[in-house]
Amino acid sequence: MADLSLLVLTLLWGTSFHLVKVVLEAASPGVFLAARFAAAAGALGLVWAVRRDPAGPRLWRDGGLLGVFALGGFLLQTVGLRFTTPSRSAFLTALSVLIVPFVARFALGRAVRASAWVGVALAVVGLALLTRPFEGGIASDVRLGDALTAGCAVSYALMIVFTSEWSPRHALAPFVLAEVAVVLLGAVLLVPLETPRLDVARLPSFTATVLFTGLVLTAGAFFVMAWAQRRTTAVRAALIFSLEPVSAALFSSLYGGERLLLADWAGGALVVLGVVAGEVGGALERAKA
């Protein structure tokens, strides 16, 4: 059930890349992120008020650090989307799949099954096909967007690993609220540092995107992520999250009109194969243990 929840979440996340790319034509990154996380914080605050879950020790330390990782990821990804395409952004974000096992193994000493390494290897080859990092003819601003998004992958990898590490210690509502509150604070502080912009003519579509990304893809998603990662490993979660760029590419192609080449589809297929190898191989290894 935990893995299925993460899969559904991943497919929904795939829609966000095109939506955010479009909304950045109407608003600056800080304005959008502040509005998105204000909506998420409001929803999570209401949940906490209803549930009255106790705030345990180290809540703000653990939730705050996760919020710092999340802020870095969202900020780098959102700014990067101003320059690169939705599908490239999604595929580069999924590089967190490569980073998670290294953090889990060498920073925390967690055992990583052989099947997970096979899945990660296949996913990385797929990502290389999709992004073609050494191919010529790619504009410098797209390269900048790609570089920013690669930094986002590092932040997300840390968030995935430490969500699995820390979420079992705390009640879900206050824990996720602490994480989201830090991102909201960072986004609000960012606004004066940029040139704030919001196209009033596009306010209805901006509001709709804020509500969808804030309530469903942030408040709901962080809650599901913290719940599910109590019941699965960080590496398994990362492998499932690697399906996000495939979902993003399909959505961007079918809905946004982005043109995908044969290499893009081949890379996506390898990412899917990596997820299957990691999941099925892990089940077989556990059965033999």
Image (cartoon, grey):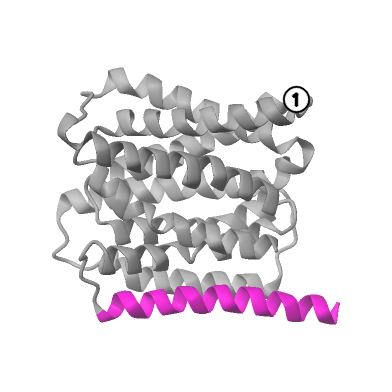
Q: Position of residue 139 (x, y in %)?
A: 14, 56
Q: Looking at the image, which is closer to me, 189 or 118?
A: 189
Up-down: is 233 above or below 65?
A: below
Considering depth in this image, is 218 or 129 the residue closer to the camera? 218
In the picture, measured across the screen, residue 261 lies left or right of residue 209, that is: left
In-image side of 82 versus 139 (left or right): right
- Viewport quadrant of the N terminus: bottom right
**Above or below, comparing residue 228 to residue 114 in the picture:** above
Please tell me which residue lies in front, 243 or 114. Answer: 243
Which stretch is magenta? 262-289
Q: Give x and y (percent) for residue 140.
A: 16, 51
Q: Quadrant of residue 180?
A: top right
- The picture places residue 198, in percent across and down from the top left corner, at 21, 29
Element under label 1?
loop
Which residue is labeled 1 in the image? 55
Q: Residue at x 70, y 38 (%)?
A: 172
282 falls in the magenta region: yes
Percent x, y of residue 48: 67, 29
Asked if one can make out residue 248 in the rendered structure from this viewpoint, the answer is yes
